Amino acid sequence: MTIQKILVPDMGDFKDVEVIEVLVKKGQVIKKNDSLITLESDKSSVEVPSTHEGKIENINVSVGDKINKGDLILTLESKQETNGPVKEKSKKEPVKQKKQNEVVQVQQQQQPAPSVPALGKSSASPKIRKFARELGADISKISGTQRDGRVSAEDVKNFIRSQVTVSQGEVQKKEVTKYVEEYSHEEFGEITTQDLPRVKKLSGPHLVRSWTEIPHVTQHDEIDVTDMEQFRNSLYDYYTGEKIKVTPLAFIAKALVSALKEFPNFNASLNPESNKIIYKKYFHIGFAVDTPHGLMVPKLRNVDQMSIQKIGEELKNTSQLCRELKIDKKEFFGGSMTISSLGGIGGTHFTPIINPPEVAILGVGKTFDRLVKEKNQIVSKKILPISLSYDHRLIDGAEGARFCVYLGKCLGKDFAFKLAV
Ligand code: CAO
């Protein structure tokens, strides 16, 4: 029987890291690689695994302690052989000596630091780590979809789902279906292949997650924007007399903010785990940008506080930053709702895919002319096709329809009043 000292391993360039969780108890029998404590820096948290199996003799750290590489975490009564002592720089009490007349011969051994991911690389909160542990998932195998690759509860669930399927009460290993084409493409003629661009590689899983997990409803509508278009085309700079060029998208973004104020369920996110709805008090509108690298969805912050002209300028600047790959990654997160406008290209209705954790997205087509009968006269109207997709778990069809009607009003006759609010 030996006494093993389990020390704080090398975690990269970090000092005085806080212990936020002690995952074991004195007297507990643990296996090699069982998690002992969770450490958290300002960037991330990491669990420290045991290098040995055995019974915990003493725990030398507690929650709130600030520790460094080489500090003593705990001592273990172990039958395992050790790799020989290494230098210890524990601040804590050394392991208590056993009495000489004890039957078991006690050797004090120290363990080299186990290898754990450097702090700042492993990325999941202690709550999520605990959640993963409870479900028996190895957090290091789960790729995070959140900012900086942080793992969310949803990622853990997806991982579990990908590992097993529950059928008639039994948990079975899921068969991974590989689709093999019966004939190769080359058999039908000449082909070339190239790598999927990086942006598409990154956005692919996000789109699949949205499409397969969110019950989408897409509502199509048409908005009479004749007045708005007249107004837009009549904008001139007061001082220079030059025409101000603002695309319809700036008006739509402003109108969308009015609709979000009226229908807070659209400016929300769902936490299916806690069955909670998160309502956002800010109005950060995402807009899809077509770039040579793939689709990007940056956010315009605080659109409620911007004039139409300012929104127009920000749309131009931000889409330029995306196309030049100069946009900050953070700008792709923290949105209220997204607009996907194909109005500059063409087409009418389509099915926009929700950009989670948002719960709705507005698709915009190209404005077209339509002849309508008004007061016994045939007049030409400018019609804007819209397609609103929403998460049916939170938003009902009736609310979706009301949202479209309201948006129509904001962009219709009383647009000036609504947009000014
Ligand atoms: N109806 C008619 N004309 C429209 C219009 C609409 N709904 N929306 C824009 N236009 C006009 C603009 O007024 C502009 O006209 P001028 O050249 O006469 O000034 C022209 O179309 C081009 O506009 P734009 O596309 O450059 O600017 P925008 O503000 O409308 O859009 C941006 C900016 C970044 C959204 C756009 O450039 C873009 O990338 N769109 C593609 C988005 C996309 O890919 N969505 C699909 C996502 S799902 O895969």
Image (cartoon, rainbow, N blue to C red):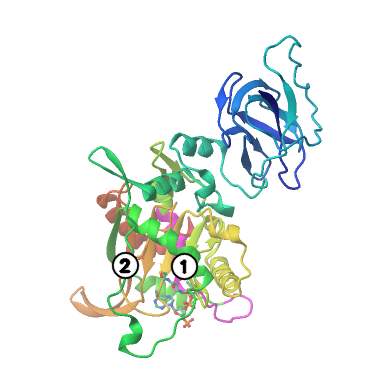
Q: Nearer the viewer, residue 72 or 216?
A: 72
Magenta stretch in the rendered image: 237-259
Res. 125 visible in picture: yes
Whether disc 2's CB lies below 8 Å from ligand 1 is answered no
Q: Is residue 394 left or right of residue 206?
A: left
Which residue bears the numbered disc 1? Answer: 288
Horizontal and vertical percent for residue 316?
56, 73
Q: Nearer the viewer, residue 60 or 366?
A: 60
Disc 2 on helix, strand or loop? loop
Quarter occupied by the N terminus = top right
Horizontal and vertical percent for residue 398?
25, 51
Position of 292 relative to 159 (above/below): below
Q: Nearer the viewer, residue 337 or 393?
A: 393
Which residue bears the numbered disc 2? Answer: 179
Quarter occupied by residue 356: bottom left
Q: Is residue 95 magenta?
A: no
Q: Nearer the viewer, residue 383 or 35?
A: 35
Query: Label 2 neighbourhood size at 10 Å, few (<14), some (14-19), many (20+)?
Result: few
Residue 348 disc label: none
Res. 416 visible in picture: no
Position of 206 relative to 186 (above/below): above
The image quadrant where one finds ligand 1 is bottom left
Whether disc 1's CB lies below 8 Å from ligand 1 is answered yes
The amino acid type of the residue labelled 1 equals Ala
Disc 1 on helix, strand or loop? loop
Q: Is residue 14 left or right of residue 317?
A: right
Position of 194 relative to 339 (above/below): below
The amino acid type of the residue labelled 2 equals Tyr
Q: Earlier in the sequence, mark 1 or mark 2?
A: 2
Residue at point 45%, 34% (across, down): 134
Horizontal and vertical percent for residue 122?
61, 47
